[in-house]
Amino acid sequence: MAGMIFKRLAEELDGIIARDPAARSRFEVALTYPGFHAVMAHRLANYLWRNGFKTFGRVVSQIARWVTGIEIHPGARIGQRLFIDHGMGTVIGEMAIVGYDVTLYQGVTLGGILPSVNAAAQVGVKRHPTLESGAIVGAGAQVLGNITVGAGARVGAASVVLKDVPSGAAVVGNPGRVVMPKGSCREFNAYVIPTRDLPDPTARAIEGLLDQVSSLQARLRALEGELEEAKALSVTLNGALPGNATSEEPGLSPDSAAPWLKEASR
Ligand SMILES: CC(C)(COP(=O)(O)OP(=O)(O)OC[C@H]1O[C@@H](n2cnc3c(N)ncnc32)[C@H](O)[C@@H]1OP(=O)(O)O)[C@@H](O)C(=O)NCCC(=O)NCCS
């Protein structure tokens, strides 16, 4: 039994070390990571909750909150190796379900949409999100309602997510929009590195506008070139006019000749 407990603890600690470049040893993580403390306290709180000691479960959960700044309702179902990095301000609601190897950063809410309205009707109702295995939720993200964040999906920092997120997709913004389609997320990379060539509709619209601007600039340059050629041609023609026709005379100056030459050159 003790061996089993130590094996599970070691798994939890290794899961954290694998996902935090700043983590140096199991000992250090066990001693200094509030996310680890909160999850361990939750195991006890959840045990009490499931076995009918609901108030004691809540007391344990609240003590853990005082100590860690992370509030996990004892009724929440949390899979193995949940890593809550930093954690301060993170709230996990009663009906939330969190799969294996999920990562949450500070300030994340897994909450309900309108818990304060018609609260009685919401008792015992699945009103909080489900996070499937390997999901990552960035700092300050709010994931609200009975929605599912699919396996390996990523939620950007400060996003507000109100709809299901497909497995392997990435969502950012408020309201959350998919910036990388299903299955295109790369392997987990803590403090993720930006990439290009993504089908973000806003970015694509801006790219389209930039293309149009550059083709308009090219067209303008071509017209300016034609105009210069036309001016040069009109000067040449003026020079070739017989005897008394000079560029001083009305209708024969290079500038006044340019419009009809420009028309002719089109
Ligand atoms: C969403 C996230 C997971 C995506 O990372 P990624 O897979 O490497 O994707 P990219 O960084 O290439 O971003 C894709 C696009 O979304 C945009 N984007 C990324 N994160 C965003 C965010 N939080 N809010 C708004 N837009 C975001 C990028 O600017 C990029 O847009 P572009 O295509 O116009 O350039 C990541 O940006 C993120 O927010 N991670 C959370 C990390 C965190 O909370 N760290 C706290 C540590 S203490």
Image: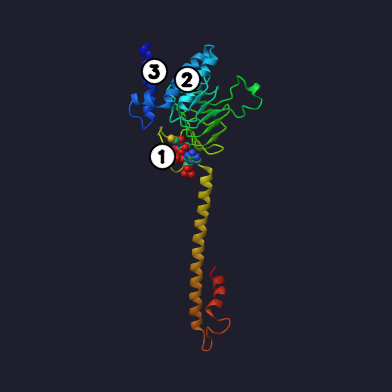
Please name whichever residue, 177 or 145, is drawn nearer the observer in this view of the structure: 145
Say what secondary structure mark 3 lies in.
Answer: helix
Q: Report which residue position mark 3 lands on.
A: 8
Image-based side of 147 in relation to 138, left or right: right
N-term mark: 1 or 3:
3
Q: Which residue type carries mark 1?
A: Ile
Image vertical order of residue 107 relative to residue 60, above or below? below
Q: Report which residue position mark 2 lands on.
A: 42
Q: Report which residue position mark 1 lands on.
A: 193
Please tell me which residue is depicted at 36% across the width and 28% down the height of the picture: 17
Q: Does any atom of ligand 1 lie closer than 8 Å to the CB of label 1? A: yes
| Residue 31 visible within the image | yes
Q: Nearer the viewer, mark 2 or mark 3?
A: 2
Residue sticking out furthest to the bottom: 244
N-term mark: 2 or 1:
2
N-term mark: 2 or 3:
3
* Circles 2 and 1: CB atoms closer than 8 Å: no
> Quick one: label 1, few (<14), some, or many (20+) residues within 10 Å?
few
Please tell me which residue is depicted at 36% across the width and 17% down the height of the picture: 7
Image vertical order of residue 63 relative to residue 1, above or below? below
Say what secondary structure mark 2 lies in.
Answer: helix
Residue 166 position, x and y percent, is 52, 31
